[in-house]
Amino acid sequence: MSSESTTPYGALKTALESAGFEGQIRRAIDKRPGLLVLQRLAGVDPTTHIILPNRNSFWVAERQGQWYIKTWANFSYRVPADTDLVALCRDALNARAIPLHVVPDDIAKAYGLEREVGTTFGQDNALLFPDPPPEYI
């Protein structure tokens, strides 16, 4: 069994990759599983077969059983425990043709996301989220 499949991100990554998206597990500075970067690449939408000119991406993270979405504008959203995380990520990835700066209001409302204020999962950004590689910006 790979170390990737033993993280909280393995099943989510596999499910979204089988739906045509891409996922990359990133480690925090202290080498514990940090987050999963998800993206929809330019190409053909797997559902509608429409050609997509750009890509969308954001991060998801699990902390002590609680899931979060983090956007590239440094906003964190708490995901309710009973949420279908695969469906949420799929809808968010299909929502825009550019990386998410905020979760669109309709998706936040539909999934009951709560935006956190003044913190990233209650911890310091530098520890949990080392700078993303240029290809994800």
Image (cartoon, rainbow, N blue to C red):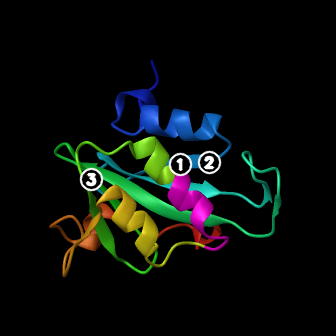
The tag on residue 24 is 1
Callout 2 crowding tier (Cα within 10 Å): few <14, some 14–19, many ≥20: some
For the point 64% across and 67% down, the residue is 135
Q: Quadrant of the C terminus?
A: bottom right
Q: Which residues, given as a range, are shown in magenta?
A: 90-98
Q: Is residue 103 visible?
A: no
Rendering coords of residue 102 (x, y %): 43, 77
Callout 3 crowding tier (Cα within 10 Å): few <14, some 14–19, many ≥20: few
Verify whether residue 26 appears in magenta.
no
* Secondary structure type for disc 3: loop
Amino acid on which the number 3 mark rests in the picture = Asp
Query: Decide: marks 2, 1 in contact (CB < 8 A)?
Result: yes
Seen in the picture, residue 102 relative to 64 is either above or below; the reply is below
Rendering coords of residue 61 (x, y %): 33, 53
Rendering coords of residue 55 (x, y %): 68, 66
Which sits in the foreground, 96 or 109?
109
Callout 1 crowding tier (Cα within 10 Å): few <14, some 14–19, many ≥20: some
Which sits in the foreground, 69 or 85?
85
The tag on residue 30 is 3
Rendering coords of residue 74 (x, y %): 37, 77
Query: Decide: marks 1, 3 in contact (CB < 8 A)?
Result: no
Amino acid on which the number 2 mark rests in the picture = Glu
Amino acid on which the number 1 mark rests in the picture = Gln
Q: Which residue is mark 2?
A: 22
